[in-house]
Image (tube, coloured by chain):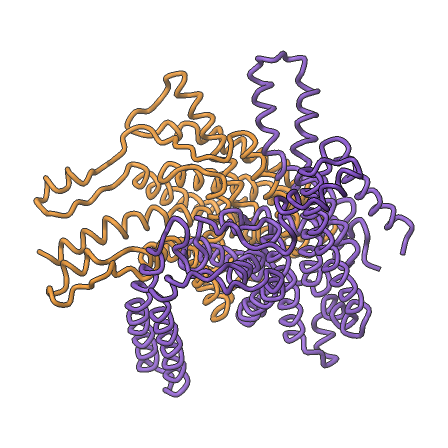
Chain colours: A orange, B purple
Amino acid sequence: MDVLQALIVICNFVAVPALAYGSQLALGALGVTLVFGVLRFSNFAHGDTMAFGTMVAILATWWLQSLGIGIHPLPTALIALPFSIAVTAVLLLATDRFVYRFYRAQHSPPVIFVAASIGVMLLFHGLVRLIIGPWDQNFADGERFILSAREFKRATGLDEGLAIKTSQGITVLAAIAIVAWLYWFLNRTRTGKAMRAFSDNQELALLSGIKPERVVAICWIIAAGLATVAGVLYGLDKSFKPFTYFQLLLPIFAAAIVGGLGNPLGAIAGGYLVAFSEIAVTYAFKKVFRYLLPEFLEPSGLAQLLSTDYKLAVSFTILVITLLAKPTGLFGEARQ
Amino acid sequence: MRIRDPAMFAFAALLIAAVGFAQSWNVALAILNMCLVSAIVALGVNLQWGYAGLFNFGIVGFVALGGVATVLVSAPPVEDAWRAGGSGLAFAALIGLATFVCAGIAFFKLRRGRVRALGTAAILLIGLFLYRSFFDPAVEAIESIEPARFGFLGGFGLPVLVAWPVGALLAAGAAYLIGKVALGLRTDYLAIATLSIAEIIIAVIKNEDWLTRGVKNVIGLPRPVPYEIDLQNSDEFVSAANSIGLDAATASSLFVKISYGGLFLVVLLALYALSQLALNSPWGRMMRAIRDDENAAEALGKDVSGRHLQVFVIGSAICGLAGAMMTTLEGQLTPGQYNPLRFTFLAWVMVIVGGAGSNRGAILGGILVWFFWIEVEYIGAILADSLTFWLGEGSALRMHVMESVAYMRLPTMGLILLLMLRFYPRGLIPEK
């Protein structure tokens, strides 16, 4: 019985939150990895692209709420998604047209692309602050829980509760749906195959008649979609704050690199790996040990390896270990 | 030297003078002082990026370490805190050291395999628990000593100018450790690694209250220059101020700012001279050769990774020095202000605007970018006011535009960076 209690504590405080957070990171890392695969640079503006997409979704949500439109048990932001993806895609395509295309034509080294993406990052970050302000915004509405701790306790008769937030449920389902669609798109459709071919070998792809500008445009549109969905889901789960989204860049990059930059499956695995380690390392396991260990062995402290203030250290450690031990990532080669 | 270069510096001086006339000389001098510090940071970044082509996105971390050094050197020691927790901390440090030594011995002496992996992990884990059992109570004891005023160990109570070289050394030490681990990575990986190390350094400074008081800030650090109030009480100073037609209050604050400015100028000129000498020496030529073609330089027998580490350490030390100077200027350590957008990426904009690889360019970039960073708000307010006056006082749109001006800085910097990269990729004062 005590083992079961301990298991539920772990589920409630580690597994469920990490599954949701991991899905958000995986979606973000997919965007980074896709841009790297097609355009060959690390896009530092991705975190702020997420912030931009989420901001558009929040504004649309407020407008819909003022009209009284909603889909009650689910958050209103979900109906705002298609619109915000479209706006973000337009923004990214415009950025590509006015910033990156020039350097592509010049065959500039990746360093220049990274520097340009820093400029784009500052621009987007500033734009978001300009429009919606630097503060926290909470835009989750609808039913808060799929399964609340009280219901769970009543149904099972256990002392420990297990709560699943609506946002967590939506996140995991959305991640599964998007990954499945992306897998189908990349492996089964003509455009997807063209993208992979372009990513594998640009010259060969050009020779076989693939239009590079079309591949790049589709890549940005998908990146916009992934960034917006990841951002909105993260915002629903926690809250929206421009600076937090900028900081998300680090775990997202860690996830993408652990899996191997340019490798979509790796990005997903990396997302969950980073999320689970981050939450497991910063969780205080005192309660779990209280159920598992005999009384005299009980830890006196919180049994927490690292305070939550240092959670960035976890993604950093994972990043450095990967880069030093297996620079190509866990899942095959990231091409130089 | 091209004729345009001094002209651009004159233009920068003119901008600052314009602030003096339009706003006030106090504001102008405050901007000038930060311009000088920014120019020093830009020199450091230029050393790494312009000379050696290294991506360092951890600048804010090194600047913050300089700030910490200022506290550790110049703050008066809190003796009660030392008595309460000093021995505990020392024990914890010994245990930490012993753990690493044991783990190292186990790792290098045992044969590769499961025994080694598990043994090393076990040593580290046991060491961590032992360490925490001394460290946590010591920290608690220190932080409970007059938490409203102290709650930290304090510093050594030395003159604050000592903190400047110490800040540089502290940053250099950190850079050495970081560089050892991360410099082998290729460019954008290095950028990401340094970006996250800086975030960790900032997290430590914000959360380890026993060392830096964290977000409670350390205020009232000693100054290398006189206090305004002492100047105002000195008859000599007051009569001198009156004789040039200034009242004592204005004159004293101008005097303090000018003294800081003089100190900063000396440091900046010395660093500039050293950087110029280095750039034109055989060492400088070797660095540029490595930057332009690592493989060729290596084939010619140059120690590429050694030189990279060297220039990474020196550049970071300069950032640490600038950080110590900044904290000295402010007279307090406010860890909450260390934001990568404001320090790291702004420094990059400075170097790219000025011209990577050119020291004069870095200085000019530092001055101009800092100037606009501060003045965008003022210029933006005037612009917004004159563009929206026809909307009428109560208009909601006008109110929103006027409020948004406060957030104009970042997009302006992003735009400047993109425009420079596109149209002047070699910067205002290009490398020769």
Q: Position of residue A231 (x, y in %)?
A: 45, 40
In the depicted structure, whether residue A288 falls above or below residue B183: above
**Image-quadrant location for residue B228:** top right
The foreground one among B278 and B108 is B278
Q: Residue at x 54, y 34 (%)?
A: A129
Q: Position of residue B338 (x, y in %)?
A: 53, 50
In the rendered image, the quadrant that contains the N terminus of chain B is: bottom right
Q: Is residue A39 at all visible to an observer of this figure?
A: no
* Number of marks in picture: 0
Q: Is residue A13 left or right of residue B46?
A: left
Residue drawn at (57%, 20%), measured in percent from left and top? B399
Image quadrant containing the C terminus of chain B = bottom right
Q: Residue at x 37, y 36 (%)?
A: A236
Residue lying farthest to the right in this orientation: B3
Between A294 and A10, the one lying in front of the other is A294
Please, is residue A14 above or below residue A63 in the view?
Answer: below
Residue B320 image offset from top left, x and y in percent: 60, 61
Outermost residue, front side: B235
In the rendering, at what x and y percent does residue B277 appear?
80, 68
